Image (cartoon, rainbow, N blue to C red):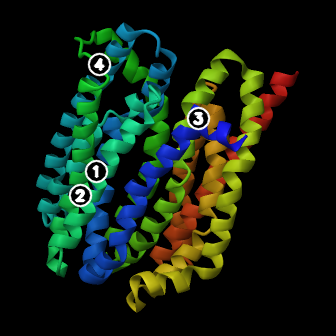
Amino acid sequence: MLKNLAKHRLVKDTIILFGVQVSGYVLPLVTLPYLTRVLGPANFGLIALGGALVLYFVVITEFGFAVTGTRQIAMAQDDSAKIARIYSTVMLCKLCLMLFCFVILLGLLATIPRFRMYWPLYMVSFLQVTGSCFSPNWFLQGMQRMRYIAYSDYGAKIVSVLCIFGFVHKAGDYLLVAAFQAGGFLISALIGLWLVFFKLRIPLVKPHLQDMREAMLGGWPVFLSTASMIAVSSTNTMILGFVSSPTEVGYLNAAQRLMIAMRALTNPVTSAVYPHMSRMAANSRPEALRFLKKQVLWTATPFLAISGGLLFFAPFAVHLLYGTKYAETGVLLQLMSLTPVVHALSMCFGTYFMLAFGYEKQWSKIITRMMVLNFVCIGLLMLVLSPVRAIALTSTLMDIFSCTSCYLFYRKTIRSFTE
């Protein structure tokens, strides 16, 4: 039975994408103890500020196509002409959005002194936006060619890690760190493009303006939702940078880097299951719901153990990883300890159910409410807590709000299915 299970395409895709997450998140964690010690909290915080700003542009460039484009490709796998048209349309949309973002970046650097002070950092960090623009991972995921995603990500992330160890040796090398980390995304995208053109032989066709308009309109609800979530995390970092010191940002960044890696462990399962769930929901909703109920248990259980480990052992783990200078990071991780299991449940009821079943607008409303509530909570909690702790606790509360809202919508909707 296990042998047959291992041969199942969905299981194989999940295993491959789990390996991608190892290269994309766990490999950089290898450099984390080294960077925190070499750069120090202040310069480590500057790296976080650069990443927080360009993350806005990454979200604008992707514009929800990782969800809507993937679903369109998954549903058109047997029509090569339609696949080429969808791919060309989405890529041209992303290119136009990237150019728009670069103009916005130049405007920010020219008009805001705090940004202009570190303009080389933000320019170098923009390489991540370029990589996001040209990355065909959304397309490869829709085609269920997960091993191609693995090829591009493994190579790029390994090169990035080796460069950090080879060339970063002092606190002033933070620009090199930003270049190696952001450049890894661009290298991964170039490898992915080579696979699309020379392995899958997908031709580029001239997109129609109407197709581009429909693609943008289709991605708009998901973009709003994703932008809201990223705006919360990135804006929280930017807020901390304006009201506190880079050192405080460094403490938060050290905690968030570990938390992102833990949250990302859900991504292999999500990336493999989402196209499968989308096709099931299109063909048979009752069958898709039965599949979802099984996924909830398998997805959430491992992350419940991770959350428990964070709650009790975070200070000890931080002491081993980062050293005594980052004691505050251990407290922040304890405040954020529920995030892994809550995020896993959100994937089940948000991505697997609401997005796969076509409830993008309802999902976007939940995330938009969360964004507004986030800033209200930060303002209130800063009255009784330090800014960095207020932001850490707020992030956990917002995850709980999002998960609960998605679950309540799921319960309400399946009740209407039954009736």
* Residue identified by numbered label 4: 202
Q: In the rendered structure, which disc, 2 or 3, sits on the residue that comes first in sequence?
A: 3
Whether label 4 touches label 2, CB < 8 Å:
no
Q: Please rate how many residues cluster around mark 3, counting C-alpha atoms within 10 Å: few if below 14, some from 14 to 19, many from 20.
A: some
On the image, the x and y values in percent for residue 113 come to: 15, 63
Q: Are marks 1 and 2 in contact (CB under 8 Å)?
A: yes
Q: Amino acid at mark 2?
A: Val
Q: Earlier in the sequence, mark 3 or mark 1?
A: 3
* Separation of residues labelled 4 and 1 (CA atoms): 22 Å
Q: Are marks 3 and 4 in contact (CB under 8 Å)?
A: no
Circle 2 sits on which residue?
159
Sequence-first disc among 3 and 4:
3
- The residue that label 1 is drawn on is 155
Residue 17 in view of the camera: yes
Q: Is residue 218 above or below residue 184?
A: above
The tag earlier along the polypeptide, 4 or 2, is 2
The residues tagged by marks 1 and 2 sit, at their Cα atoms, a distance apart of: 6 Å
Disc 2 versus disc 3: distance between alpha carbons? 29 Å
